[in-house]
């Protein structure tokens, strides 16, 4: 290992500009003659729009345009789509209600887009929006997902029982038969709380139309600019792809919420054309983000685990109602189906699994992927069931897990996934050691002496990420292929530019991707630049989500590097007058076997471009290669997280005393960045367990948790210093042996916290978020009973 290559703990290159405040985010970009958009949003959860009078707003100072859903329809602006087709159990396709970019006839959640005002200044746009007179006829809102199928009110006219699809996975009869034989059944009612993503940078867009070229440019906070271009072009119909450039510059976090194609960016593009080509800009205010960014999770599940007399799991079944919100967002339908039910085997050998999912519409913001997407929900179901079953069977939870761990690979689960590699005993054992489990009893006794309750909980999670194989996702309903592409351009002086279809918005790609290049070509890190986020520069790309940029994006780069090396060998052989087979390449130098002839990588690059005396029929000038990579399987990171916490029964305050995480991410490119990714994920998972929860008023459908006063994000002071360890089993389905690390913490953490908290309080179950009030009530009731 070199000090900048694979495995090196290199500090993030991009942080230099970020910590100096020199990042270039959408809101930092200013174009000549720009204008401002302000969206008038629905104050009602569910209402008919009877009339919209925009005349006063249009006449207001500085106003350039006021546009409504009728104008969009007149201009043939298409609606937003959901790109993953799910079929119900009866074979019928999912029922996707229309999703216009500005409401047409009806509003379906508080925050739904009703009209846009474009003006010279933001203040003028906002003032004019107040003059828009909308006549609403309020309708009963559908708020509770569990009640949605029975609710007489319909979110989308014609979509009966507010149900988008009723889907299932696994063999029902075989699973029921195992349950009939079970010696013990553990049943839990689980609510996976609704979360609001809260990236540091709110969403933003600038749409700019050039009438001379009939060309559009969109600057946007996107995790996948090429996918945005594809959808906006092919479905919304703003412009053909070659007439639309999408740029996603520095993006300040996304956590999934910036994968999707939203109304605002489309409207900015369209509005720019409507006002003759002046750029139209919009940056969300934080309260708009709360209302109108796609939310995450929101499952209501009944789950059961069946065990035999020997404490072996024989079956699992679950019924989940998944809240989709008011519209099916871009990838929403994949989350409670193929990203959820397929992971219900956890790390365990479970012969039969059956899961039913009813996806329902409610008058709430759309729900789509949020860090982990489906896999945190699955892990929560499995790990809460396993922990509870162990306690009911009076077995040590670690021992119960060991009895049921999968040990042979590859392992075909009954729910599609075929795990390729892993060592679950190793991660559990190492985590117990690092967590000093043997000292827990003494620490618990010490807490007791101080009047505190101490608990410990595990989460031995698994996930499928490196979201890719195009054939697999295609067969499951995905509308696109999920390969990745790369181009490696070696300049004549030997510096290297890598154009990648992945998009970095906090994951450190500019560093880890450069490490791969440095490792392979022997060039210093500062001579490698990573280019991403611009459809005019990068050939194509499917973007960043599902922890795929390492396993899929870097693998595409590795393939392009193979081609660069092969070409450079040819050039070196020609220049050094040797046979190609005699050329060796190591540490950035080409040598001729058995001689002292040697050329540096830079010299070979220069020779490739100078190309004097090349036999051009055999060697083309230049040194630039591209590759697409489509892996053969997902990657399956897995590990063991152990949470140890202390509860103050007087106040209900929970203090996380220790956090131990041992993860298997295959080959680590940069352990420092990986650790950062794990830290961030755990923080989000702890937030879900203890503080975060989006709440809509049941009567009115208003978002009650619409600001940081009501929606509590975890802070650094809520978290301990984490103890991390790694187990490494190589992933066989990509050339680097990597598994994704970007979501693991968020997937593992909620179950670890809630297993620890129920242990501390001596209760079977608790709802998330277990806020101090929830905990205090339970602790007080327990004390009163004692
Ligand atoms: N890496 C590594 N060794 C491995 C695996 C990964 O060194 N074995 C490095 C990669 O090279 C990359 C980083 O770790 O620099 C994360 O890689 P990967 O797990 O492939 O995840 P992605 O880059 O595809 O990022 C997506 C993932 C997801 S799905 C969410 S959600 C998420 C996350 O990353 N959102 C984030 N981490 C985030 N971090 C920040 N700061 N902001 C977000 O919005």
Image: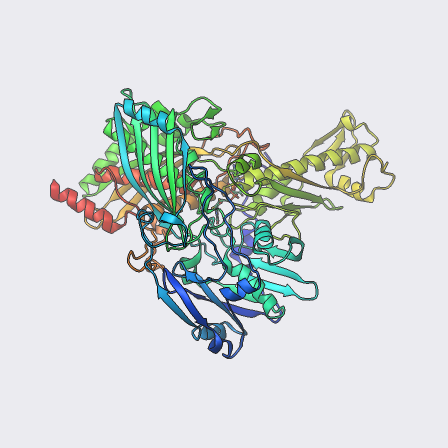
Residue 483 drawn at (x, y percent): 59, 39
Residue 287 drawn at (x, y percent): 40, 62
On screen, residue 357 versus residue 626, left or right, reads: left
Q: Residue at x 29, y 20 (%)?
A: 310
Height in image: 748 above or below 278?
above
Residue lying furthest right in this view? 613
Which quarter of the rendering shows the C terminus?
top left
Height in image: 157 above or below 48?
above
* Residue 276 in which image quadrant: bottom right
Residue 148 drawn at (x, y percent): 33, 49
Q: Residue at x 46, y 27 (%)?
A: 422
Res. 113 visible in picture: yes
Res. 286 visible in picture: no
Q: Nearer the viewer, residue 684 or 2?
A: 684
Which quarter of the rendering shows the N terminus?
top right
Height in image: 408 above or below 168?
above
Q: Nearer the viewer, residue 542 or 391?
A: 542
């Amino acid at each position: 290992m070199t000090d900048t290559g694979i495995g090196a703990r290199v500090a993030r290159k991009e942080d230099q500009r970020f910590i100096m405040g020199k990042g270039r985010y959408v809101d930092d970009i200013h174009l000549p003659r720009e204008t401002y958009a302000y969206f008038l949003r629905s104050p009602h959860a569910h209402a008919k729009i009877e009339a919209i009078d925009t005349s006063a707003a249009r006449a207001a100072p500085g106003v350039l345009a006021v546009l409504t859903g009728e104008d969009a329809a007149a201009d043939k602006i298409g609606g937003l789509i959901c790109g993953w087709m799910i079929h119900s159990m009866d074979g019928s396709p999912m029922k996707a209600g229309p999703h216009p970019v500005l409401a047409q006839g009806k509003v379906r959640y508080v925050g739904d887009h009703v009209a846009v005002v474009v003006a010279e200044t933001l203040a003028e746009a906002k003032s004019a929006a107040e003059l828009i007179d909308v006549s609403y006829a309020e309708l009963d809102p559908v708020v509770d997902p569990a009640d949605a199928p029975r609710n007489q009110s319909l979110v989308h006219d014609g979509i009966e029982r507010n149900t988008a699809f009723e889907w299932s996975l696994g063999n029902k009869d075989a699973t029921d038969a195992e349950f009939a034989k079970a010696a013990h059944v553990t049943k839990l009612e689980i609510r996976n709380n609704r979360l609001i993503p809260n990236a540091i940078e709110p969403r933003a867009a600038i749409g700019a139309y050039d009438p001379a070229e009939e060309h559009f440019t969109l600057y946007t906070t996107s995790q996948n600019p090429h996918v945005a271009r594809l959808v906006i072009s092919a479905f919304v119909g703003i412009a053909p792809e070659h007439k639309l450039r999408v740029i996603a510059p520095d993006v300040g976090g996304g956590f999934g919420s910036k994968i999707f194609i939203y109304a605002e960016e489309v409207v900015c593009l369209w509005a720019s054309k409507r006002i003759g080509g002046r750029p139209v800009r919009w940056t969300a205010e934080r309260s708009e983000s709360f209302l109108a960014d796609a939310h995450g999770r929101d499952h209501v599940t009944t789950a059961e685990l069946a065990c035999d007399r020997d404490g072996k799991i024989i079956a699992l079944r679950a019924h989940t109602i998944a809240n989709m919100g008011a519209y099916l967002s871009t990838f929403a339908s994949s989350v409670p189906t193929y990203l959820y039910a397929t992971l219900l085997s956890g790390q365990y050998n479970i012969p039969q699994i059956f899961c039913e999912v009813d996806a329902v519409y409610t008058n709430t913001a759309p729900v789509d992927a949020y860090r982990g997407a489906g896999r945190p929900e699955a892990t929560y179901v499995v790990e809460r069931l396993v922990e509870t079953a162990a306690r009911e069977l009076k077995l040590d939870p670690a021992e119960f897990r060991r009895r049921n761990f999968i040990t042979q690979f590859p392992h075909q689960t009954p729910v599609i996934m075929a795990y390729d590699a892993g060592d679950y005993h190793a991660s559990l054992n190492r985590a117990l050691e690092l967590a000093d489990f043997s000292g827990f009893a003494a620490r618990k006794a010490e807490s007791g002496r101080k009047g505190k309750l101490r608990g410990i909980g595990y989460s031995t999670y698994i996930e499928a990420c490196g979201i890719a194989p195009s054939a697999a996702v295609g067969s499951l309903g995905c509308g696109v292929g999920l390969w990745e592409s790369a181009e490696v351009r070696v300049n004549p002086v030997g510096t290297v530019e890598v154009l990648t279809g992945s998009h970095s918005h906090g994951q450190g790609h500019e560093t880890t991707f450069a490490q791969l290049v440095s490792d392979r070509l022997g060039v210093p890190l500062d001579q490698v630049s990573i280019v991403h986020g611009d459809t005019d520069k990068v050939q194509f790309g499917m973007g960043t989500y599902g922890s795929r940029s390492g396993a899929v994006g870097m693998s595409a780069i590795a393939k392009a590097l193979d081609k660069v090396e092969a070409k450079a060998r040819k050039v070196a052989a020609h220049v050094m007058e040797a046979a190609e087979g005699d050329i060796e390449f190591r540490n950035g130098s080409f040598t001729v076997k058995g001689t002292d002839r040697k050329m540096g990588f830079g010299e070979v690059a220069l020779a490739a471009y100078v190309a004097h005396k090349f036999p051009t029929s055999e060697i083309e000038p230049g040194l630039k290669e591209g590759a697409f990579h489509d892996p053969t399987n997902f990657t399956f990171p897995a590990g063991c997280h152990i949470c140890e916490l202390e509860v103050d029964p007087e106040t209900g305050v929970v203090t996380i005393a220790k956090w131990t995480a041992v993860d298997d991410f295959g080959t680590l490119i940069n352990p420092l960045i990986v650790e950062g990714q794990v830290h961030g994920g755990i923080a989000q998972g702890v937030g879900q367990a203890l503080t975060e929860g989006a709440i809509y008023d049941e009567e009115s459908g208003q978002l009650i948790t619409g600001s940081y006063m009501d929606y509590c994000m975890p802070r650094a002071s809520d978290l301990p210093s984490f103890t991390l360890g790694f187990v490494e089993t190589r992933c066989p389905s990509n050339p680097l042996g990597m598994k994704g690390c970007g979501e693991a913490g968020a997937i593992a953490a909620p179950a670890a916290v809630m297993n620890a908290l129920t242990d501390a309080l001596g209760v079977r179950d608790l709802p998330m978020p277990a806020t101090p009030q929830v905990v205090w009530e339970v602790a007080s009731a327990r004390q009163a009973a004692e």
